[in-house]
Image (tube, helix red, strand yellow):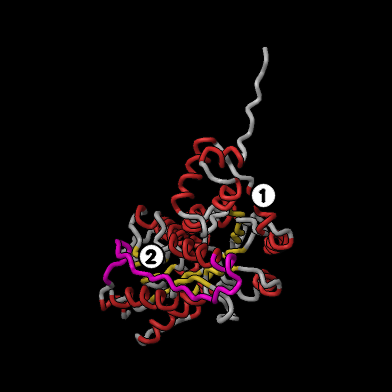
Amino acid sequence: MERRVKRMVTIKDVARASGVSPSTVSRVIADNPRISEETKKKVRKAMKEMGYYPNISARNLVVKSTKAIGVIMPSSADKALQNPFFPEILRGIGSIIHDMQYSLSLSTGQTEEEIFNEVQRMVNGSYVDGVILLYSRKDDRVVSFLRERDFPFVLVGRPFGHQHTITYVDTDNFQAGKEITNHLIAHGHQKIAFVGGSQDLHVTIARKAGYIAALEAAGLDTPADYQVHADFLRSGGRMAVEHLISLETPPTGLVVSDDLMSLGVLGTLEDKGFRVPKDMSLVSFNNVYLSEITSPALTTVDVQIYELGAQSAKALIEKTQNENEPTKRIIIPHRIIHRDSVEEQPVDEAGS
């Protein structure tokens, strides 16, 4: 029995079907602004109907673009992706790169050294047009390398240096930390602890600074043993609580720098016989989906994670498409979501 091999559709076939020249089809594929929207729609309709897919690799060689961006996690992907913050920020990034017909390359290194080597390969091998770092860390080798190579990148988080030359997207974490701590103070709490992530991450430093500023403005103590640091994971929350409730004077309120940590905090408090918010009030950050469905539902700062991702992708693509694009400082608004994890602290107990 004779077997027919289906012939691949070519640019010439698309040109013939849509009544334009092959060069016009090429310009439509490249989204050339000189081609009218009417012609673009006609050509794209023909491409779709005929099942024509442009050879992106060949096109990229010509225009010296990969149409790909690299996304770098603050730690190994399997560890970071346990935190709902990262799938949500990737969803925001994905929404923009999908519309712009870019692809995404996610770092998978297990250690800081492996992640750094992976970024070097991305840049030196011309695998991506630019990089988004989903964190801002002190003395980061990745940032130093990208700056030395003058390679397009965007930070999610305020940079530790070179703020006038690095484009970044951030929440006002200092102000957010201050506001959420003031929420506990307004409910009568005077013994308030802070549970944060790594002390070399800008997000932790800024939120903790806001917490301290609120306490100092209210004339309240900021004892060092009320300030605990652990991983942005559920296990980190458990470890922090065990320390705080072992103190001679445990706090009555907790400011936890991440919703996933807060789940560990809630679980451990329950295991130890503490009721939230009756025995201890708790506020958190990020407003991931888990914060609403846990019991009690968390009062938390909504940092608009999806928008952080979307704006970082927009800013990076603008940089990759125009080397003269000015440096941007993009601050995403935040708001407190009031739920069930805070209760009024009686004055006689708060002052005892």
* Circle 2 crowding by C-alpha within 10 Å: few under 14, some 14–19, many from 20: some
Q: CA distance from mark 2 to mark 1?
A: 40 Å
Choose between 349 and 108: the one closer to the eye: 108
Instruction: Identify the residue shown where x is 70% and y is 71%.
Output: 149
Look at the image and say whether residue 268 sits in the magenta stretch: no
Can residue 246 be seen from the camera position used here?
A: yes
Seen in the picture, residue 84 relative to 53 is either above or below; the reply is below
Seen in the picture, residue 185 relative to 48 is either above or below; the reply is below
Look at the image and say whether residue 323 sits in the magenta stretch: yes
Residue under label 2, please give it.
Answer: 302
Q: Amino acid at mark 2?
A: Asp
Q: Which quadrant of the figure has residue 275? A: bottom left
Instruction: Identify the residue shown where x is 54% and y is 55%.
Output: 31
Q: Which residues are magenta?
A: 318-344
Can residue 226 be seen from the camera position used here?
A: no
Q: Position of residue 250 (x, y in %)?
A: 41, 72
Instruction: Identify the residue shown where x is 37% and y is 65%.
Output: 300
Q: Amino acid at mark 1?
A: Ser
Choose between 119 and 251: the one closer to the eye: 119
Indicate which disc residue 57 carries.
Answer: 1
Instruction: Identify the residue shown where x is 48% and y is 62%.
Output: 309
Q: Position of residue 46 (x, y in %)?
A: 50, 40
Report if the CB atoms under discs 2 and 1 are less than 8 Å apart. Answer: no
- Secondary structure state at the residue bearing disc 2: strand
Q: Quick one: quadrant of the N terminus?
A: top right
